[in-house]
Image (cartoon, rainbow, N blue to C red):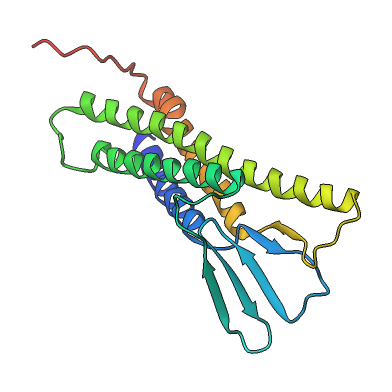
């Protein structure tokens, strides 16, 4: 049962890390939600804005200004949280790979490998919190901005809703959290071992 949990947690961690990386790099955190705009499809990401012509499929993108330039708080906060979530998820994935029982690294010291799996779970939990905070922050900010415009009867030509990149960030963060639970609570219940960080005395 422990081996099955390890493999499941690894697969979920790998998939969730890819989701987080794709969410950070892709350009559809905001998408135009005006059904009357059938000529073009607009998407805004954390790094650039893209417009796709619906007739010929041509896609053009405009890069935002330098990272050091002034940007909306929504962009700055989400960028920071997602990058930190990506780094933590990547670190957790590397730690988990080395801590798997099926990997020969430190095969003679199962206690250390167990600690590495627990450590990966803790790191994943932190990454999932950051990623979910960034994704939900962005989604709520987009929603509130739209509600404010509608309540004041302001129409700017395009209304935006949060797009699939934002959903991808939420999915990746949720997956990291589930993997964290598997690596800490569930794995502990199956192994029945407690993690002690005191050196073993032989």
Decide if residue 174 is in sight here. Answer: no
Query: Residue 177 location in percent, x, y?
Result: 50, 36
Residue at (90% x, 48% y) in the render: 151
Decide if residue 172 is in sight here. Answer: yes
Vertical position of residue 177 compared to residue 78: above or below: above
Q: Is residue 92 left or right of residue 169?
A: left
Query: Residue 118 location in percent, x, y?
Result: 35, 27
Task: Name the residue at the bottom extreme.
Answer: 56
Image quarter of the C terminus:
top left
Location of residue 161 by image quarter: bottom right
Q: Is residue 94 left or right of residue 26?
A: left
Task: Name the residue at the left extreme.
Answer: 202
Q: Nearest the camera: 5 or 134?
A: 134
Question: Number of numbered discs present?
Answer: 0
Residue at (32% x, 32% y) in the render: 117
Residue at (45% x, 37% y) in the render: 127
Vertical position of residue 117 compared to residue 36: above or below: above
Image quarter of the N terminus:
top left
Location of residue 111 by image quarter: top left
Q: Nearest the camera: 199 or 157?
A: 157
Query: Residue 69 location in percent, x, y?
Result: 49, 52
Q: Nearest the camera: 70 or 174?
A: 70
Residue at (52% x, 41% y) in the render: 131
Query: Residue 139 location in percent, x, y?
Result: 67, 47
């Amino acid at each position: 049962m422990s081996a099955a949990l390890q493999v499941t947690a690894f697969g979920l961690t790998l998939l969730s890390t890819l989701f987080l990386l794709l969410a950070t790099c892709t350009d559809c955190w905001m998408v135009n939600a005006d059904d009357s705009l059938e000529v073009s499809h607009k998407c805004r990401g954390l790094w650039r804005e893209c417009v796709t012509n619906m007739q010929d499929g041509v896609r053009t993108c405009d890069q935002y200004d330098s990272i050091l330039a002034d940007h909306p708080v929504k962009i700055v906060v989400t960028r920071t949280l997602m990058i930190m979530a990506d780094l933590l998820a990547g670190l957790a994935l590397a730690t988990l790979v080395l801590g798997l029982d099926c990997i020969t690294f430190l095969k003679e010291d199962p206690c250390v490998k167990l600690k590495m799996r627990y450590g990966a779970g803790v790191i994943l939990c932190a990454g999932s919190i950051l990623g979910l905070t960034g994704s939900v922050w962005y989604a709520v900010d987009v929603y509130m901005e739209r509600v404010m415009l509608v309540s004041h009867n302001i129409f700017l030509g395009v209304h935006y809703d949060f797009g699939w990149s934002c959903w991808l960030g939420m999915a990746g963060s949720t997956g990291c959290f589930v993997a964290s639970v598997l690596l800490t609570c569930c794995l502990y219940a199956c192994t029945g071992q407690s993690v002690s960080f005191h050196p073993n005395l032989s």
